[in-house]
Image (spheres, rainbow, N blue to C red):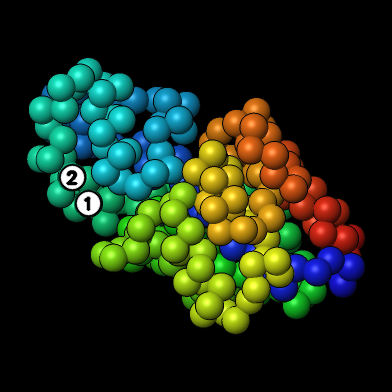
């Protein structure tokens, strides 16, 4: 293996799994309950990424509830509906499984750090990649600050006995790039995700890829 990374921490939504169908579908079910207009998937791509509370706040405003009259009431509704629909039309991004397999073959450990509620994060990852495929999965939970706070990344590094300089962080939003910076990790921007290259490049990551297999070339993995 020609790279010095022993581990990669991945964001979930928009990075290893296209979850926009589930996020949009569930959010629109909530908005409908309050008589508000549905949002498009393109709109939702700009809304998600900072936890479900911020997601609902932004969604309500975008749908016309400027005063956030329904905000507190919407949160348990979203949690209940997302528990039911979080696997709706999930799919891995093209080439991601090959990249992950190549990393594992090269001896790298794989982890997921997401602002999605922990149980839903585990459920989503295991539905697409199977149980035990990743070495560590960590989602939003009581007592753990959300990204871009580095606490989750630090927890993963400690659990896997990895030094910061040995770990890569891959994500598709400004929140992810900030998380990598705050944790002292080299970042790879996933431009195939929800936000695109311009947002990622503003944070000067180590590399920005338009598709997962470009990361394999960056890491000098075997030809996938």
Q: Which residue is mark 1?
A: 79
**Please, what secondary structure does the residue beneath circle 1 have?**
helix
Between 121 and 87, the one nearer to me in the picture: 121
Q: Which residue is mark 2?
A: 75
Please identify the quarter of the rendering in which residue 30 is found.
top left
What residue lies at 63% left-to-right and 76% top-to-bottom?
A: 162
Of the 4 image quadrants, the one containing the N terminus is bottom right
Of the 4 image quadrants, the one containing the C terminus is bottom right
How crowded is the residue under tag 1: few (<14 C-alpha within 10 Å), some, or many (20+)?
Answer: some
In the picture, measured across the screen, residue 132 lies left or right of residue 188, that is left
Q: Is residue 137 above or below residue 23?
A: below
What residue lies at 18% left-to-right and 45% top-to-bottom?
A: 75
Between 186 and 20, the one nearer to me in the picture: 186
In the picture, measured across the screen, residue 3 lies left or right of residue 77, that is right
Q: State the image coordinates of residue 189 (x, y, percent, origin top left).
A: 66, 44
Q: State the image coordinates of residue 123 (x, y, percent, origin top left).
A: 39, 65
Please identify the quarter of the rendering in which residue 204 is found.
top right
Calculate the distance from the C-alpha at mark 1 to the C-alpha at mark 2: 6 Å
How crowded is the residue under tag 2: few (<14 C-alpha within 10 Å), some, or many (20+)?
Answer: some
What residue lies at 65% left-to-right and 44% top-to-bottom?
A: 190
**Please, what secondary structure does the residue beneath circle 2 have?**
helix
What residue lies at 54% left-to-right and 40% top-to-bottom?
A: 173
Task: Kindly check if marks 1 and 2 are in contact, taking CB atoms under 8 A apart as contact.
Answer: yes
């Amino acid at each position: 293996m020609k790279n010095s990374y022993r581990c990669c921490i991945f964001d979930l939504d928009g990075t290893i799994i296209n979850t926009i169908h589930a996020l949009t579908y569930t959010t629109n079910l909530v908005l409908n309950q309050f008589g508000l207009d549905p949002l498009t998937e393109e709109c939702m791509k700009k809304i998600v990424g900072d936890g479900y509370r911020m997601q609902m706040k932004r969604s309500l405003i975008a749908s016309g509830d400027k005063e956030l009259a329904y905000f507190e009431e919407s949160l348990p509704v979203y949690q209940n509906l997302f528990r039911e629909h979080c696997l709706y039309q999930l799919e891995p991004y093209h080439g991601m499984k090959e990249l992950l397999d190549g990393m594992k073959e090269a001896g790298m450990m794989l982890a997921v750090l997401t602002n999605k509620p922990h149980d839903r994060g585990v459920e989503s990852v295991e539905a697409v990649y199977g149980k035990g495929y990743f070495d560590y999965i960590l989602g939003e939970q009581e007592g753990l600050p959300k990204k871009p706070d580095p606490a989750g990344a630090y927890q993963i590094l400690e659990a896997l006995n990895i030094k910061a300089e040995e770990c890569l962080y891959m994500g598709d939003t400004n929140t992810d790039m900030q998380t990598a910076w705050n944790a002292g990790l080299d970042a790879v921007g996933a431009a195939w995700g929800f936000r695109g290259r311009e947002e990622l490049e503003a944070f000067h990551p180590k590399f920005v890829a338009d598709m997962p297999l470009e990361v394999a070339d960056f890491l000098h993995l075997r030809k996938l």
